[in-house]
Amino acid sequence: MSLARAGLRTLRSLPSRQVNRATSVLAQRRWLSEEARRQIDSHVKEADVVVFMKGTPDHPECGFSRAVAQILDVQGVPREKMKTFNILQDAELRTNIKEYSEWPTIPQVYVKGEFVGGADIMYSMHKDGSLEKMLVKEEIIEELPELTEEPTQ
């Protein structure tokens, strides 16, 4: 049985009042004002790559933010194509970005206005090569030339 079906069966076994209360609480937690949503929409489109992180790329204030900054640096993302927001300086943005993306952790990376993920996803994509392919496809970085083997003598 799939996990989703098992979860549905669990919900059906609960009293409807309890399900309604839990659903109402979840809906309230996911509520984001239109003004806040417009502001974040604007932020994620300010640059080709937008990162909401703890600290700055030069001075990250957590290991996960440091990892994302290093990955983007290794990938060769030019700083002029990247905008970062230090969420430690804005508690409201720190809360709202999590609601906006429905992603509970920081850092959060957006490419061309689309949410990519956090440090774990960025690391995985970096490791399997899909991050480089996406950055090339979106014309953020240039494709590296193929390595050619020189004949051995």
Image: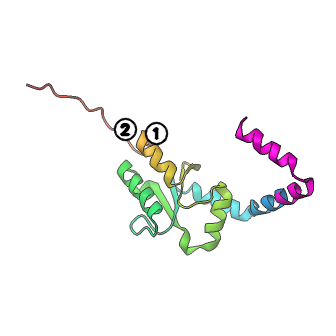
In this rendering, would 11 be left or right of 48?
Answer: right
**Mark positioned earlier in the residue sequence (2 or 1):** 1
Question: Which of the pair 40/11 is nearer the observer?
Answer: 11
Q: Secondary structure at mark 2?
A: loop
Image quadrant where one finds the C terminus: top left
Figure quadrant of residue 143: top left
Q: Nearer the viewer, residue 35 or 24?
A: 24
Q: Is residue 100 above or below residue 58?
A: above
Mark 2 vs mark 1: in front:
1
Gap in angstroms between the C-alphas marked 2 and 1: 13 Å
Res 111 seen here = yes
- Range of residues picked out in magenta: 1-22
In the rendered view, would you say 150 is above or below 87? above
Image quarter of residue 44: bottom right
Q: Which residue shows up at 80% across the image and 58% down it? A: 27
| Quadrant in which the N terminus is drawn | top right
Q: Amino acid at mark 1?
A: Ser
| Image-based side of 105 in relation to 9, left or right | left
Q: Residue at x 74, y 59 (%)?
A: 30
**Residue 140: % across, % down:** 44, 46
The residue that mark 2 highlights is 143
Taking the image as shown, residue 1 lies to the left or right of residue 152, namely right
> On the image, numbered disc 1 is attached to which residue?
130
- Dot 2 amino acid type: Glu
